[in-house]
Image (cartoon, helix red, strand yellow):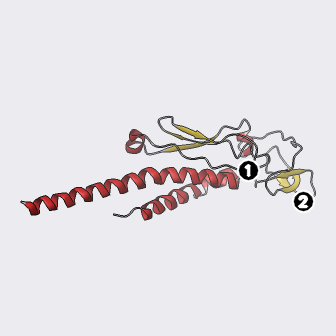
């Protein structure tokens, strides 16, 4: 009887460890991935004053949201909100990442825009040229034109459709699984 109790205690400990691994990998892993995707977007995207890069937000399917300050300055990290039990257990998509800047679509080259020099130097290195269209990064020239761009044309579409999101999720889930020990 005592041997059975010891075996059952070992099974209980094993079940607790498996629960701990599942929660860590499938809760913290997606959160870390969302946070790092925002960092990737901040690095790939335009940074003039910093308002756009500090306007990323991460939201869970049940409406929990964390957001950048929207303030000028160097890009700031955005921590992911915690998943609820419902979001953890049932939703395929755990987080939605968006940008609340009033000119987010122009900055992501999704729509044409009208660009005014804010009168301050950009916080990020830039290319010079002549703007061919109304898209932010659509520059041609030999670094002599009047327009400046701190990110290449279609940087956002390239990131989203080029597999970078899937790679980031895989990296963060693998890293999280590697941190957990039985």
Extreme left residue here? 1
Q: Which of marks 2 and 1 is nearer the N terminus?
A: 1
- 76 above or below 70? below
Q: Position of residue 166 (x, y in %)?
A: 53, 56
Q: Where is residue 46 in the image (x, y as percent from the top left)?
A: 75, 50
The residue under the point 47% across, 35% down is: 62
Measure the C-alpha gap from mark 2 to mark 1: 24 Å
Instruction: Tell me: 41 left or right of 18.
Output: right
Instruction: Tell me: 167 left or right of 42.
Output: left
Instruction: Tell me: 81 left or right of 118.
Output: left
The residue under the point 58% across, 54% down is: 36
Residue indicated by mark 2: 143
Q: Nearer the viewer, residue 81 or 1?
A: 1
Question: What element does badge 1 sit on?
Answer: loop
The residue under the point 75% across, 53% down is: 153
Q: Which of 111 and 180 is in front in this view?
A: 180
Which quadrant holds residue 88?
Answer: top left
Residue indicated by mark 1: 74
Q: Where is residue 156 in the image (x, y as percent from the top left)?
A: 67, 50
Extreme front residue here? 2
Say which quadrant the C terminus sits in. Answer: bottom left
Question: What element does badge 2 sit on?
Answer: loop
Instruction: Tell which tag, 2 or 1, sits nearer the viewer.
Output: 1
Instruction: Tell me: 45 left or right of 130.
Output: left
- 8 above or below 54? below
Q: Which of 6 and 116 is in front in this view?
A: 6
Say which quadrant the N terminus sits in. Answer: bottom left
- 132 above or below 99? below
Q: Where is residue 151 in the image (x, y as percent from the top left)?
A: 76, 54
């Amino acid at each position: 009887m005592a041997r059975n109790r010891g075996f059952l205690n070992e099974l209980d400990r094993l079940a607790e460890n498996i629960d701990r691994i599942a929660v860590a990998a499938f809760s913290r892993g997606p959160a870390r991935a969302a946070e790092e995707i925002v960092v990737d977007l901040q690095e790939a995207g335009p940074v003039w004053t910093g308002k756009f890069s500090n306007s990323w937000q991460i939201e869970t399917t049940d409406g929990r949201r964390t957001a950048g300050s929207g303030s000028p300055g160097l890009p700031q990290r955005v921590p992911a909100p915690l998943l609820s039990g419902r979001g953890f257990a049932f939703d395929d998509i755990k987080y939605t990442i968006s940008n609340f800047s009033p000119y987010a679509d122009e900055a992501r080259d999704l729509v044409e825009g009208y660009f005014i020099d804010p009168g301050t130097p950009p916080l990020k290195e830039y290319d010079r040229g002549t703007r061919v269209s109304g898209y932010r990064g659509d520059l041609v020239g030999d670094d002599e034109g009047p327009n400046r761009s701190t990110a290449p044309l279609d940087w956002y579409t390239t990131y989203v459709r080029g597999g970078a999101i899937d790679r980031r999720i895989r990296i963060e889930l693998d890293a999280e699984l590697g941190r957990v020990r039985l």
